[in-house]
Amino acid sequence: MDQPQDQSDNPLHNGDPLHNGDPVKKGQKLYEGKAKAIFATDTPDQLIQYFKDDATAYNAQKHEVISGKGKLNNAISHHIMTALGSAGISHHLIKKINNREQLILKCTIIPVEVVVRNIAAGSMVGRLAGNHIPISQGTCLKSPIVEYYLKEDALNDPIITSEHITEFGLASAEELDYIRFTALAINRLLTNIFADIGIVLVDFKLEFGRPAAPLEGEPAIILADEISPDNCRLWDRETGDIKDKDRFRKDLGGLVDAYQDIASRFGLTVSLP
C-alpha cells in the first residue's frame, strides 16, 4: 500500500469538489456515539457528522453535558483536518456545514483505536510504571510509541497487538503497516501544528476507515473521526496547564475555557453557547 504523499489538489485533502454546492439534505440518524452522531444525506457515499456537547470518560461511566463543547470540537477538528489534508494526509472531511456539523465521506470504520504517545501519561503510566519501567506522568519518550486498542466499549477498549489485528481480520498486515506509517506521519505534523501555538502534544487517538466509494489513485484506508482536545492530550508549553478532556476526567473544571483557548490560538472564532 502506497504511503502518504503531498496531494494538496486532491478532493480528499482540500476544499469541496466532492459536493456540487447545493444545500446538504440531512436524512435519518444512522448512529449515535458518546460525542457525535452520524446522519444520512441524499448522497449515498456522504454523511453528516454532528458534534454533541456530551463529555464522557471511563467508557461513559462518567457523563456530563457541557454547553459549547461540540461547537469547539467541530471548529478545531475542521482546522486540523484541513491542515493535515494540505500536507497530504487523506481524510474523510469534505467540508464544515455549520457550527456543529461536517459533511464527511461514508467509511467503514476499522474497529481499532490507534494511540500515538510522545510523553508518558494517562493509562500508559497506570499499566507500566514500576520497578522494571521507571516512568511517571510527564516522562518524555525517546521515540513515539504506537499502541492499538480494540474499539469495543463492552470490553473497555482493551489494548491489543498487531498480531491480534491481523489474525482476527481487523486489518491486513499491509493495511496495518500503512496505518502505523500514517499515524507517525500525522504525529510529526500535529506536533508542529501544536508547537506553533505553544502547546505540547502528549498523545492522541486516531481512527481510520475504508471509504464506501474510494477515489481512483487514493488509499483504500483514510483518516476518519475527529482530531480535537477530546482525543488529544495537550499541555501548555510554558505552564503545563491541561488543555484537553483530562480537565473533565480529573474534575478540574474549565473544560470549555481550555478548548476555547486552543481555538483562539488557532485564530478560530467560535460563538458560544
Image (tube, grey):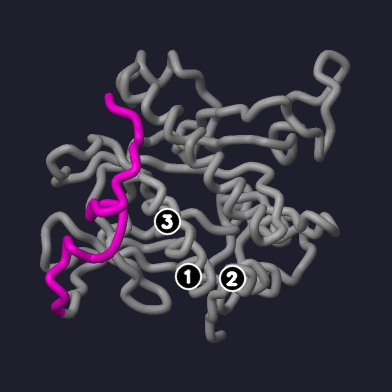
Instruction: State the SS at label 2.
Output: helix
- Mark 1 vs mark 2: which is more N-terminal? 1
Q: Is residue 206 magenta?
A: no
Q: Residues within 10 Å of mark 2 (few under 14, many from 20)?
A: many
- The quadrant the C terminus occupies is bottom right
Amino acid identity at mark 3: Met
| Left/right of residue 114 with respect to residue 22 in the rendered view | right
- Mark 3 vs mark 1: which is more N-terminal? 1
The residue nearer to you, when weighing 190 against 27, is 190
Q: Which residue is mark 2?
A: 263
Q: Which residue is mark 3?
A: 81
Q: Residue at x 25, y 59 (%)?
A: 30
- Magenta segment, which residues? 1-22
Q: Which residue is mark 1?
A: 75
Image x and y of residue 38, in percent: 31, 61
The residue nearer to you, when weighing 51 against 189, is 189
Q: CA distance from mark 3 to mark 1?
A: 10 Å
Are the residues at dot 1 and dot 2 in contact (C-beta closer than 8 Å)? yes
